[in-house]
Amino acid sequence: ARSDAYFEGGYWLQLWGFLYTLGALWLMLGSGLSARMRDLVERITRRRPVQTAIYTAFYVVITTILFFPLNVYQGFFREHKYDLATQTFAEWLGDFLIEAGMGIVLFPLLLIPLYGVFRKAPRTWWLWGSVVGLVFLAFLMLIAPVFIDPMFNTYEPLADPLVKEPILSMARENGITVDDVLQFDASKQTTRVSANVSGFLGTMAIRLNDNLLNRCSLAEIKVVMAHEIGHYVLNHMYELLMIFGLILVGGFAFVRWSYDGVVRRWGGSWSVRGIGDLAGMPVLATLFATYFFVMTPFVNTAIRVNEAEADLFALHAAREPDGMAEVALKLGEYRKLDPGPIEEWIFFDHPSGRNRIQMAMTWKAENMPADPAAPDAPGV
């Protein structure tokens, strides 16, 4: 019941978060704040890329302030209410401010080329904008494990050989050549178990958090790590990049279709001139927020299919069906275990606990030999 309440509350948070976003961005436009920010950066410099960088920094600061009440409820108070968080408020705020600072650094890397495309390609900007967005997404996925994650946690080699060696063995069996497994101190932030296998060229690494080590059996750890190895071996990152690329094309096409109409209707009162006008950034964000809110079931389904494939890979690689079932119950502390099919299609980006347990037990029935000493074993 507690897990259902937490997860179902998340459905409403998606709706309220979307409406909150619309209200906050509308406030930036309707108050004239966005136009004044644009006017200020145009007085500071005539160089368009520098204007975009400065405006983006202002934009990140303003939206961080506007969204702070929602973030502090969703990220701190609600997580503590359900005993999923371990940080003090000061510790949580420190991580929150680091994320905001990263936004000031990273968002200009996206928006400078994006607004350059808007200005240079007035007819085909939506296609080239999709390419820019996809390249930026790939860049984030590749650098996050190496440069971003260590800002929040400490990574060190896993010391226990009884845990490390089976993981390395599974990795070698599946073509992943690494010499070590890293653990990180997620318990200082959360009670959730997690792991990942990621990297590119020389940055490849296998990582698991200390909650997984402290709360799970070796069978559970093996199946979780086999699942993450499966994502890497099955090239899910690249597959999802292609899928997200198509979704981005659809998003930019939607913005291309709707942006001019919105500006014609309200642009005069907002002092927004067109797609290349920095003052229109909240309009751009509003339209993308609307598009991705509607696309939630399709994005979740694309991810959920890959997660199910990684589950099946993990069963074959680790051969620990009971471990998969048991860890599915631990994940059920914050994911609803038995949703309806439509509910799962709309809201779940991972298979439900029930489906994972059923997959594990079906695999066990088909692959694990029966104990000949058991009373109900075949032939007895």
Image (tube, rainbow, N blue to C red):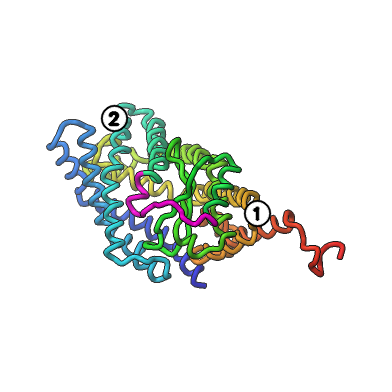
* Residue 145 visible, this angle: yes
Q: Residue furthest right?
A: 379
Residue at the location (35% across, 44% down)?
Answer: 147
Choose between 300 and 165: the one closer to the eye.
Answer: 165
- SS class, disc 2: helix
Q: Residue at x 60, y 52 (%)?
A: 311
Q: Find numbered disc 1 in the image and state the secondary structure of the residue it sits on.
A: loop
Residue 179 magenta-highlighted: no
Identify the residue position indicated by label 2 in the image. Answer: 119
- Horizontally, residue 323 falls left or right of residue 108, namely right
Residue 368 position, x and y percent, is: 73, 57
Label 1 and label 2: CA atoms lie apart by 55 Å
Residue occupying the point 40% across, 46% down: 145
- The quadrant in which residue 252 appears is top left
Q: Which residues are magenta?
A: 147-162
Label located before the other in sequence (1 or 2): 2
Q: Residue at x 36, y 57 (%)?
A: 19
Question: What residue did someone put label 1 on?
Answer: 319
What kind of residue is marked 1? Answer: Arg
Q: Quadrant of residue 153?
A: bottom left
**Residue 297 locus on image (x, y percent):** 51, 51
